[in-house]
Image (tube, rainbow, N blue to C red):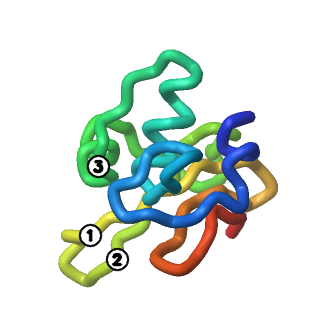
Amino acid sequence: MHHALKSLGRPYAWGGDSPETGFDCSGLVVFTHAQAKLHIPRTASNQLKIGRKIAKPGLQPGDLVFFANSSKNKNVHVGIYIGDNLFIHAPGMGKQVTYA
């Protein structure tokens, strides 16, 4: 989670997965987990597939939070839960890594 916090303010970049180039949502997760020597799939949909579902009250800092971007659930967005109903994510073009 430390590296997610250090990534705040970095630019969004489609396909980005480093502080130098910027991040997309799943790239931020790949980068932060790699710093902890954890291998995570590159795309949010594949990250979702390997996880296990937990109820919102059970969220712990460091858990991944997923959102469907369409009614067909084809596009998935991911962020990193940090506690107090907040998560860090790379929200999209023209924006920076931020809290939500």
Q: Which mark is residue 75?
A: 1
Q: Secondary structure at mark 2?
A: loop
Label 1 – label 3 distance at C-alpha: 10 Å
Looking at the rendered structure, the secondary structure element under dot 1 is loop
Q: Label for residue 22? A: none
Q: Marks 2 and 3: CB-CB under 8 Å?
A: no
Q: Residue furthest right?
A: 84
Residue 43's tag is 3
Image quadrant holding the N terminus, namely top right
Q: Which mark is residue 69?
A: 2
Where, by quadrant of the figure, is residue 32 drawn? Answer: top right
Q: Amino acid at mark 2?
A: Asn
Q: Please state if 20 lies on the left or on the right of 1 as rendered.
A: left
- Residue occupying the point 35% across, 71% down: 68
Which is more N-terminal, label 3 or label 2?
Answer: 3
Q: Are marks 2 and 1 in contact (CB under 8 Å)?
A: yes
- Disc 3 marks which amino acid? Thr
